[in-house]
């Protein structure tokens, strides 16, 4: 019987409760997810000689159960997990935790009880992945994402930057066109995220790509994340989503990009997705932008401001795309209209016609910030034929979820359909020519300049409020009914005050109800 998501989520939170009293809440995820990962791989691959992972003798979850309750359980758990990591060459790939850490888990009986209690939580038959492979694979990955979301909600700005809501990730994946690629004999498609966080955006984009005859995605996955612990979470996340062949590197992408070609320059990718830290104030740490060895700022008349790295990330993406490459990146709205050096860079990007579309998103959508953001779609293919940019104002399509906003399925579908059909929709979507952008608006891409918010306020008739009667606008809103039965309107309505467009009933309402 397949495990229910709600049951798995409650198990994860039960594990968190075992850590209360010593471990900082921000560290719960590290302990719980390392055990979750170890349990999953152990259940799936133990006694499988040709499996993707090796689970050697003395390095399985059953071995954890065997040491539960012993006086040196913390030390033994560390040894067992380390043996597993060494067998699979995963040292340094996962979050750094020690189950023998007295500072976080206490000492003596307190540590024994906490660690043994954690192991006991994961013994729950509901998460025995040996018997839940078909449905369990997706469930375990989704549970990981759920835990990341909950953690981001609870931690606010300190750690929220590494989680992109899955609704946004799925929207980007559909907009960049990765689902339309075809498998080719001599072509291996590539997908890259230079600020991958927990890997959720990478995973959603890869999920959208077609699969080969073995059911594996036809794109190779590459990601880089500055925070070592978060990079480990991303690697676990890929494995839990059956994408363990994907590469995740740890390091500062702007200062030390890991993916280079044979000439020491940035490797080129077919697709890039990215949700970088907004307005990064330390982006120049470790680099001299005017002497950038990767030539990311070459060809532009200026470099991004020292205390705002939005365009530094933008230009890194442009340099990382091949000649037909496509990207979907999340950016704060400021990149669309800010002046000075950013205006100079923006105009030159517009002149090269790299931007294909911009989607304005609702405010308060992302964990860690309440400011509104946008999705910028970049496409280097056929730029010579591009006449303008397709703009979508999706800022009013969402539902409230606690203290955050979330895109609904209908909101995602509306965005995708508008983008795909390229049809102007008053108050929502519009194709804007480069002539209007560059000549009429001097390169300013602020969405309200081009798409006016529809007036959805109810019209008020002061005379009707003061003296009674039915406003003419209300009568005209029933025009479809009057078209069907024009005599009905004449029979039941009469003008009370033509000067102020107010009607009144010509016969008592009870007579109308009787059908007279």
Image: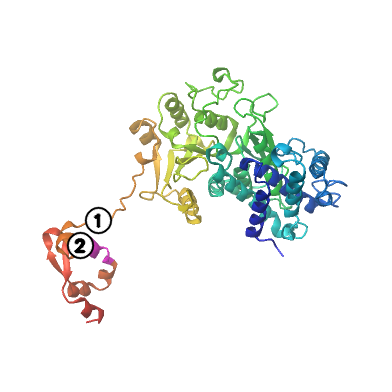
The boundaries of the magenta stretch are: 470-479
Please identify the residue farthest to the front as the structure is shown.
109
Rendered location of residue 295, percent (x, y): 58, 22
| Magenta stretch encompasses residue 474 | yes
Label of residue 459 in the image:
1
Quadrant for the C terminus in the image: bottom left
Measuring 50% from the left and 29% from the top, which residue is drawn there? 311
Q: What element carries label 2?
A: strand
Q: Is mark 1 on a helix, strand or loop?
A: loop
Residue 474, picture quadrant = bottom left
Q: Which of 38 and 269 is in front in this view?
A: 38
Rendered location of residue 390, percent (x, y): 44, 43
In the rendered view, tell whether residue 329 sits above or below residue 339: below
Q: Which of 328 and 404 is in front in this view?
A: 404
Residue hosting label 2: 471
Residue 269, picture quadrant = top right
> Do callouts 1 and 2 mark residues in contact (Cβ within 8 Å)?
yes
């Amino acid at each position: 019987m397949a495990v229910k998501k709600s049951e798995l989520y409650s198990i994860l939170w039960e594990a968190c409760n075992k850590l209360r009293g010593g471990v900082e809440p921000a560290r719960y995820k590290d302990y719980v997810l390392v055990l979750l990962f170890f349990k999953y791989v152990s259940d799936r691959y133990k006694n499988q000689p040709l499996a993707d992972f090796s689970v050697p003798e003395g390095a399985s979850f059953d071995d954890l159960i065997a040491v539960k309750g012993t006086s040196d359980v913390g030390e033994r758990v560390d040894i067992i997990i380390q043996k597993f990591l060494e067998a699979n060459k995963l040292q340094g790939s996962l979050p750094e935790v020690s189950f023998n850490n007295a500072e976080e888990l206490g000492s003596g009986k307190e540590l024994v009880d906490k660690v043994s209690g954690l192991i006991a939580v994961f013994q729950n038959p509901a998460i025995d992945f040996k018997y839940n492979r078909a449905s369990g694979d997706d469930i375990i990955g989704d549970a990981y994402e759920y835990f990341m979301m909950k953690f981001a909600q609870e931690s606010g700005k300190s750690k929220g930057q590494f989680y992109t809501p899955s609704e946004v990730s799925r929207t980007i994946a559909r907009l960049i066109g990765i689902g339309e690629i075809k498998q080719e004999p001599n072509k291996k498609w590539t997908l890259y995220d230079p600020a991958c966080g927990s890997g959720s955006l990478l995973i959603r984009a890869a999920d959208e790509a077609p699969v080969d005859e073995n059911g594996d995605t036809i794109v190779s996955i590459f990601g880089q994340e500055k925070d070592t612990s978060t990079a480990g979470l991303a690697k676990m996340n890929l494995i839990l989503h059956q994408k363990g062949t994907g590469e995740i590197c740890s390091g500062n992408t702007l200062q030390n990009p890991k993916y280079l070609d044979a000439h020491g320059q940035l490797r080129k990718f077919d697709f890039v997705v990215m949700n970088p830290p907004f307005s990064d104030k330390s982006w120049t740490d470790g680099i001299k932008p005017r002497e950038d060895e990767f030539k990311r700022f070459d060809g532009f008349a200026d470099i991004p401001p020292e205390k705002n790295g939005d365009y530094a990330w933008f230009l890194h993406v442009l340099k990382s795309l091949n000649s037909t490459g496509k990207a979907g990146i999340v950016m704060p709205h400021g990149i669309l209209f800010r002046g000075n050096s950013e205006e100079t860079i923006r105009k030159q990007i517009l002149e090269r016609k790299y931007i294909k579309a911009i989607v304005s998103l609702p405010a308060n959508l992302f964990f860690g910030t309440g400011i509104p953001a946008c999705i910028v779609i970049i496409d280097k293919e056929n730029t010579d034929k591009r006449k303008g940019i397709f703009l979508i104002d999706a800022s009013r399509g969402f539902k409230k979820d606690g203290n955050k906003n979330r895109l609904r399925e209908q909101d995602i579908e509306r965005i995708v359909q508008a983008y795909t059909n390229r049809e102007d929709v008053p108050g929502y979507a519009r194709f804007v020519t480069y002539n209007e952008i560059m000549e009429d608006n001097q390169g300013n891409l602020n969405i309200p300049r081009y798409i006016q918010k529809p007036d959805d306020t109810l019209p008020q008739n002061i005379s009707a409020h003061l003296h009674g009667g039915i406003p003419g606008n209300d009568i005209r809103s029933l025009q479809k009914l009057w078209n069907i039965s024009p005599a009905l309107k004449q029979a039941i309505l009469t003008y009370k005050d033509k000067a102020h467009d107010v009607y009144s009933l010509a016969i008592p309402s009870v007579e109308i109800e009787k059908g007279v």
